[in-house]
């Protein structure tokens, strides 16, 4: 890549992307997000991060997309958790806004309208375990070891890759290549059994309910592994994602 030429990079995504510029919302359990890590590897990128915390593909239908030379997209985990239908390749082709794949297609169209000559790279969601938000114990979600609305997260991730291939959109297979699993998302989950707290590893904790009113936060700092809260990556997790995206960016633009 020509180090003298600046490349305008627009990052689209959910909390994984948003948190890059809001490390305080991780309780500083993260020191650097995946976008900043990519910039260290490819310094002639000029980043505009427009990630929206908690967003789905559907949320991006009405969002303004700034002009850029390169776009990265990392979405899908919130769509899956909300039980939005994944849809089919036909839904993607027809831009069916009632499905995840349809709204993926709509987002790709919006990006092309903003910058017809830009390059687009799409990532897919990684596996997760039980999530409990660090700042609101009532904000919880089950892990991807179980389906949501009859759909597995792995099915969504593979579907995103297949649909992007239909339109020759380069992808990053974060799901398969990053190594995130329910087993290594955290080292343990702190749960209450009777009058006692126990630190249990996956899958021993999955059937034990969490009480936001009575239980302590289940993921103390020492529980962090690939994530610090069951969902959001740690420094180790973000470094892996950064390497995957940086490698693909070099292949596409270098």
Image (tube, rainbow, N blue to C red):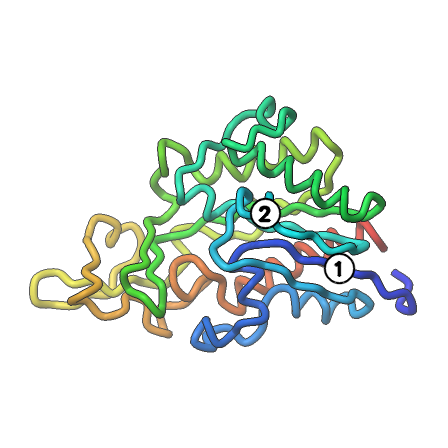
Residue sitting at the far left? 195
- Residue 27's quadrant in the figure? bottom left
Q: Position of residue 22 (x, y in %)?
A: 53, 72
215 left or right, relative to 184:
left
What's the residue at 66%, 60% (across, down)? 243
Viewer-side residue, 250 vs 27 = 27
Mark 1, residue position: 9
Tell me the tag on residue 81. none
Tell me the tag on residue 60. 2
117 left or right, relative to 203:
right
Q: Position of residue 54 (x, y in %)?
A: 47, 55
- Residue 240's quadrant in the figure? bottom right
What's the residue at 85%, 55% (across, down)? 254
SS at mark 1? strand
Q: Position of residue 170 (x, y in %)?
A: 73, 42
How many other residues sit within 10 Å of disc 1, few (<14), some (14-19) or many (≥20)? many
SS at mark 2? helix
Sooner in the amino-acid sequence: mark 2 or mark 1: 1
Q: Position of residue 163 (x, y in %)?
A: 64, 31
What's the residue at 35%, 57% (across, down)? 131
What's the residue at 82%, 68% (across, down)? 44
Residue sitting at the far top? 90
203 is higher (above) or lower (below) than 2:
above
153 left or right, relative to 75:
left
Viewer-side residue, 140 vs 152 = 140
Disc number lying in front (2 or 1): 2
* Quadrant (top left/top right/bottom left/bottom right) for the N terminus: bottom right
Q: Are marks 2 and 1 in contact (CB under 8 Å)?
A: no
């Amino acid at each position: 890549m020509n180090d003298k030429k600046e490349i305008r990079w627009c990052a689209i995504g959910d909390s994984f992307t948003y948190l890059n510029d809001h490390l305080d919302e991780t309780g500083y359990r993260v020191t650097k997000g995946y976008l900043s890590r990519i910039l260290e590897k490819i310094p002639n990128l000029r980043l505009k991060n427009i990630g929206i915390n908690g967003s789905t593909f559907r949320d991006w239908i009405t969002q303004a997309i700034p002009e850029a030379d390169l776009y990265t997209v990392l979405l899908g985990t919130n769509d899956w958790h909300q039980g939005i239908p994944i849809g089919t390749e036909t839904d993607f082709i027809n831009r069916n806004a009632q499905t995840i794949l349809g709204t993926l297609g709509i987002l790709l169209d919006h990006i092309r309208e903003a910058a017809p000559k830009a390059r687009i790279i799409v990532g897919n969601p990684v596996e997760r375990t039980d999530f409990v938000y660090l700042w609101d114990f009532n904000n919880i979600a089950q892990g991807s070891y179980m389906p949501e609305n009859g759909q597995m997260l792995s099915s969504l991730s593979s579907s995103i890759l297949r649909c992007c291939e239909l339109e020759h959109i380069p992808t990053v297979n974060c799901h398969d290549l990053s190594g995130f699993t329910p087993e290594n998302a955290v080292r343990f989950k702190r749960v209450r059994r009777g009058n006692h707290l126990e630190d249990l590893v996956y899958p021993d904790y999955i059937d034990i309910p969490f009480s936001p009113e009575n239980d302590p936060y289940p993921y103390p700092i020492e529980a962090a592994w690939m994530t610090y809260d069951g969902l959001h990556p740690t420094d180790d997790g973000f470094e892996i994602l950064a390497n995957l995206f940086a490698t693909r960016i070099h292949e596409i633009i270098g």
